[in-house]
Every structure is written in structure tokens, then in C-alpha cells.
């Protein structure tokens, strides 16, 4: 699995420091983290970002629609993060 999924899963853990289990998960090995609910949440969060918003696409160029490949490039990047 992806380094990005691990980063997001650990960020979810660190954001929930009030949860005793999350404190343990933050320090878990990657193999242990992959079995955690935070890993599943990270996959879902990254997957939800697969389709860029219009604002994101517009940010790639000064004129909206000027970069027709931006959507495909973004999707390829998200797909790589999920592998």
C-alpha cells in the first residue's frame, strides 16, 4: 500500500489523541496500522478526493478550462496514492 495512505492514517490517529486506542495506533507499526479503522478511513478520504473540484481545476491555470489534462493528471496521482 501507499506511503500516502499511511501518512493520512497516522494524521487521523494524531487528530484523535483523546481516544486511548488512537494513541496506541499512532505508534503502531505499519502492518498494525493497516488493520486499524484509521487505515480504512484514510483510504476513504483519499478516494473521495479522486475527482477534483472546479476550484481545484481552475487553480491550475489562469483561465478555467485551459488545462484539459489537469483532471486526468489529478486522478492518476490519487490512484497512485491508493496503490
Image (tube, helix red, strand yellow):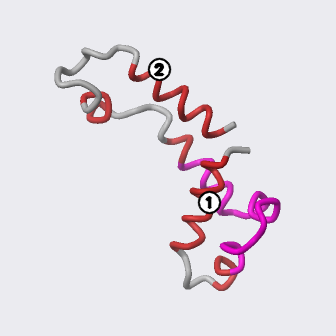
Reply above or below: 18 against 25: below
Q: Residue at x 50, y 34 (%)?
A: 50
Q: Which quadrant of the view contains residue 41? A: bottom right
Reply above or below: 53 against 43: above
In the displayed structure, does residue 65 sit left or right of residue 78?
left
Reply above or below: 18 against 22: below
Task: Report the magenta residues as a range.
Answer: 24-45
Residue density around tag 2, few if under 14, some if 14–19, many if 20 or more, within 10 Å: few
Q: CA distance from mark 1 to mark 2?
A: 25 Å
Residue density around tag 1, few if under 14, some if 14–19, many if 20 or more, within 10 Å: many
Q: Residue at x 31, y 35 (%)?
A: 56
Res 72 label: 2
Q: Are marks 1 and 2 in contact (CB under 8 Å)?
A: no
Res 52 label: none
Where is residue 75? Give x, y as percent: 51, 28
Q: Residue at x 56, y 73 (%)?
A: 14
> Helix, strand, or loop for circle 2?
helix
Q: Residue at x 80, y 65 (%)?
A: 32
Asked if residue 2 lies in the magenta stretch, the reply is no
Among the two numbered marks 1 and 2 on one chain, the one whose residue lies closer to the N terminus: 1
The residue identified by callout 1 is 9
Q: Examine the residues drawn in magenta and state their main secondary structure.
A: helix
Where is residue 45? Give x, y as percent: 54, 49
In the displayed structure, does residue 75 sit left or right of residue 59?
right
User: Is the N terminus in the top left, top right, bottom left or bottom right quadrant?
Assistant: top right
Return the residue found at the far right.
31
Where is residue 48? Give x, y as percent: 51, 42
Where is residue 58? Give x, y as percent: 25, 28
Asked if residue 34 lies in the magenta stretch, the reply is yes
Amino acid at each position: 500500500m501507499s506511503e500516502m495512505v499511511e501518512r493520512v492514517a497516522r494524521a487521523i490517529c494524531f487528530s484523535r489523541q483523546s481516544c486511548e486506542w488512537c494513541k496506541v495506533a499512532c505508534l503502531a507499526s505499519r502492518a498494525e496500522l493497516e488493520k486499524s479503522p484509521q487505515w480504512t478511513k484514510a483510504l476513504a478520504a483519499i478516494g473521495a478526493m479522486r475527482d477534483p473540484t472546479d476550484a481545484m481545476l481552475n487553480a491550475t491555470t489562469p483561465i478555467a478550462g485551459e488545462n484539459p489534462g489537469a483532471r486526468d493528471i489529478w486522478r492518476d496521482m490519487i490512484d497512485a496514492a491508493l496503490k
